[in-house]
Image (tube, rainbow, N blue to C red):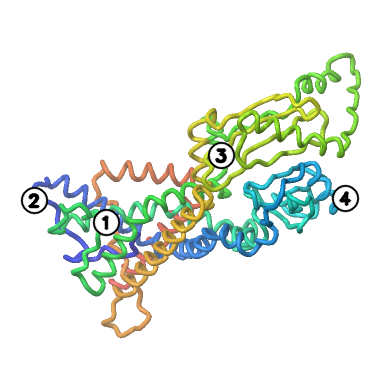
Amino acid sequence: MSITDASPPDTESAAPPPESSTPATSARRNGLYSLAMRLHFYAGIFIAPFILIAAVTGALYAISPTIESIVSRDLLQVDSSGTPKPLSEQITAAVATQPTLALVAVAPGAGSRDTTRVIFNDPSLGESERRAVFVNPYTAEPVGDSVVYGSSGALALRTWIDQLHRDLHLGEPGRIYSELAASWLWIIALAGLVLWLRRVRGRRNRNSAGWLLAPDRSQDGRGRQLNWHGAVGVWILPVILLLSATGMTWSTYAGENITDLRQQLSWTTPAVTTALPGATAQGSGGDHHGGGHEATPAAVDPGSRIAQVDRVYTVARANGVTEAVEISVPAAPTKAFAVKERREPGVYTVDAIAIDGATGAVTDTLAYADWPLMAKLTNWGIQFHMGLLFGLLNQLLLLVVMIGLITVLVRGYLMWWNRRPTRNGSPIAMGRAPRRGVLRKTSPWLAVPLVAAALVVGWFVPLVGLSLLAFLAIDLVVGLVGRVRARS
C-alpha cells in the first residue's frame, strides 16, 4: 500500500524494535521489513498504474447497476396496474417481434413494476450476448428490446462499463492489464501491511484501540502523507483482498489454474440436470446393437413449449423456488425446463429445479444448501464484486473503497516523487530505490520459505511470476549501472 523506499530509514518511517527483542529476532524482523519494502517499491512503481486504471474503471463499474436502472428505466419498469397476463401470452407477443430468432429463456419481472424479459439466441451477437425483448406483464405488449450480457443480464451501458473495466475494450490482449492488477493487488497490499505494522510499533500511543487504523496527525509534510497512505490502506484492506481474489477467477491465465483447482477439489458450481428420464439410454442404444440406427426424435413445436411455461412456472413456485428466476426453454424433446433463481440484490441463494414441461413432473432439484461451501463463497464473492450482493449499499461500499484505493496510489507516487534527490538541480530526478542485497542479508529461515512461496505463486499466477523476473532483471541492471558509476 506504499510506494516508498527503504534507504535510509529515518525516525519518521521506521521504528526500532522493542528492547526485549533478541538480535536474531530483530534480524528476522528487519529482513522481512526490508524485503517487503523492496517488493512493495518495485511492484508499486510498475504495477500501480494498472491498479490505478482498474480502480478508476472499477469505481464506475461499482455503481453501473444503479446507472443502468436510471438510464434504461423505460425498458426495465412499467406502471403496475391490474393483474399480470400469463407468461405464455407475454412470450407469444415477444416472439412475434423476433420471428427469426430461437427462443431460449424467459425471466419474469422480480418486482411488481419490472418488465418480463423474453430472451432469444441471436447468432449475430458476441460471446455471452443474447437479445431480450422486454414485455409489459400487465398488457403483454413489448416495450423494446436490447442486447443483454452474461448471467446478470447487463444491458448495453453496463456491458460497456464492464468491458472497460475488464479489458479496456482491447479484447483478449487487454485482459492482461486487469489480470496484472488483480494478481498483484493482494501482494502489494500485504507487503504494505507489513510496512505499516512496523511503523505503528514505534508510536507512543499504540496501545490505544485504534492504533492500527488511526493516522498520526501530528506529522506534517511527507510524514503526514505516509500516515494517511497507510491508514487508508488498512481501512480498505479486507475489501481489496476480496476483490483481488474474485478478480483473478475471471482472469485468463490465473483463472485457468483456479478453475482446475476448483475442479480437483470439487468446488465447482453445480448445475441441475435437464435430461429427461430415459433420454440417455435411448441416445446410446444405436452404437451397441448390431449397428442399428437411433430414431430421430420429432421436432418440438415452439408453440407447445410456450404453452408449457405457465405450468412450469407454477410447479417451480410450488416447490420452493420463490425468488426471481430465469426459465430456460429447451429446444430438444429429451430436455426438461430448467428454472434457476437469478442474482438479485439481497438474494443469497441460487436454487434450481428441472421440470418436464409435458407432464409438470419435477425431474431434478438443486437446493443452494447442497452446494459445496467453496462454491457458495465463490458465488457470494462474485456477487459482491459485481455490486449485486446487497444492492445499493454494496455499490456504495465498492465506490468508497475504489476512491480510497485511488488516494492510496496517488499518495504513494507523491511520496516517491518527494524523496527524489534534488541536490543535483535536476527537476526530473526520480525517487530513490531501496537498498539492494536485502535477500542475501536475510536469515535463511526467512529467505528460503519466501523464495519457495514466490516460486509457487509465480507458477500458479503466471503474470506475477513473469513480472517478478522482470523486476529481478531491472534490479540487476540498476545494480550494474550503479557499480559502473561508482568506479568511474
Residue at the disc numbered 3: 259
Can see residue 283?
A: yes
**Which amino acid, mark 1?**
Leu
Q: Position of residue 254 (x, y in %)?
A: 53, 46
Structural distance between the alpha carbons of marks 1 and 3: 36 Å
Label 3 or label 4, whichever lies nearer to me, is 4
Q: Position of residue 362 (x, y in %)?
A: 70, 25
Dividing the image into 4 quarters, which one contains the C terminus?
Answer: bottom left
Give left or right: position of 55 versus 283: left
For marks 4 and 1, the one nearer the N-term is: 4
Residue at the disc numbered 1: 213
Q: Residues within 10 Å of mark 4 (few under 14, many from 20)?
A: few
Provide the secondary structure element on which disc 3 rests: helix
Structural distance between the alpha carbons of marks 2 and 4: 81 Å
Q: Residues within 10 Å of mark 3 (few under 14, many from 20)?
A: some
Q: Position of residue 167 (x, y in %)?
A: 59, 59
Can see residue 462?
A: no
Residue located 17% across and 45% down the image: 25
Instruction: Tell me, for residue 19, which label it has, or none.
Output: 2
Structural distance between the alpha carbons of marks 2 and 3: 48 Å
**Which amino acid, mark 3?**
Thr
